[in-house]
Amino acid sequence: MINLLKNILSNPSVTEDNNNKNLELLCGLMIEAAYTDGQIDANELNKIKLSLVNVFAEDPKEVNLVLEEAIKNKNNAKSLHYYTSFINKNFDQDKKLLLIETLWEIVLSDGEIHDFESNLLRRLAGLLYISDVNAGNARKRALDKNQN
């Protein structure tokens, strides 16, 4: 039993599977946030790609593949619990805050905030155990970046 646990913990494919799951969930959640207003424009897609590559250090080739799949499946949306349960188990508080800030940047990239988008991000912040103050500060940082 101990050897089995050691193999699981030291097996690089487990880490790779977890990284793939991270990318799929991040992509799905970002597409969900961008599509909440009923459409995804080129600015939002570009922001999602840049965020996944530059902020979350994902491989650009993998991002393109997973993003294409997420766009195809955008109408088969998962529940917020599906995303947040994995994120709460695998992300620390700083990475969760970074995710909320990035989601705000994506939502803002089309130049307007729809009520449904704002509502989604408030609910996500709550489900990720991010305080209202920290979520508000993440929104302000995203607004500042969007104005520059």
Image (spheres, rainbow, N blue to C red):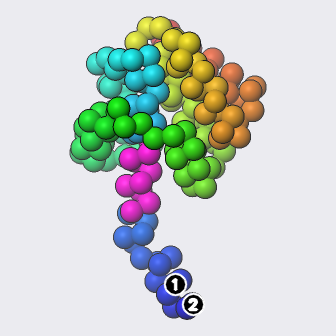
| Mark 1, secondary structure of its residue | helix
From the viewer's side, name the closer residue of 141 and 19.
Answer: 19
Work out how far the residue at label 1 is from the one at label 2, CA to CA, in angstroms.
6 Å
Q: Residues within 10 Å of mark 2 (few under 14, many from 20)?
A: few
Q: In the figure, residue 120 lies in which quadrant? A: top right
Give left or right: position of 49 versus 139.
Answer: left
Q: Amino acid at mark 2?
A: Ile
Task: Tell me the quadrant of the picture where the N terminus can be found.
Answer: bottom right
Give left or right: position of 41 versus 143.
Answer: left
Q: In the figure, residue 90 lies in which quadrant? A: bottom right
Q: Position of residue 137 (x, y in %)?
A: 68, 23
Q: Residue at x 58, y 18 (%)?
A: 118
Q: Residue at x 66, y 44 (%)?
A: 93
Q: Residue at x 29, y 18 (%)?
A: 42
Q: Which mark is residue 102?
A: none
* Count of number-bearing discs: 2
Residue range in magenta is: 17-26
Q: Position of residue 21 (x, y in %)?
A: 41, 54
Residue 135 part of the magenta-drawn span: no
Q: Position of residue 110 (x, y in %)?
A: 40, 12
Give left or right: position of 87 versus 12.
Answer: right
From the viewer's side, name the closer residue of 57 and 11.
Answer: 11
Residue 18 part of the magenta-drawn span: yes
Q: Would you say the residues marked 1 and 2 are in contact, meaning their CB atoms lie under 8 Å apart?
A: yes
Q: What residue is shown with label 2?
A: 2
Whether residue 106 appears in this view of the structure is: no
Q: Residue at x 75, y 25 (%)?
A: 133
Q: What residue is shown with label 1?
A: 6
Q: In the figure, residue 19 lies in which quadrant? A: bottom left
| Mark 2, secondary structure of its residue | helix
Q: Amino acid at mark 1?
A: Lys
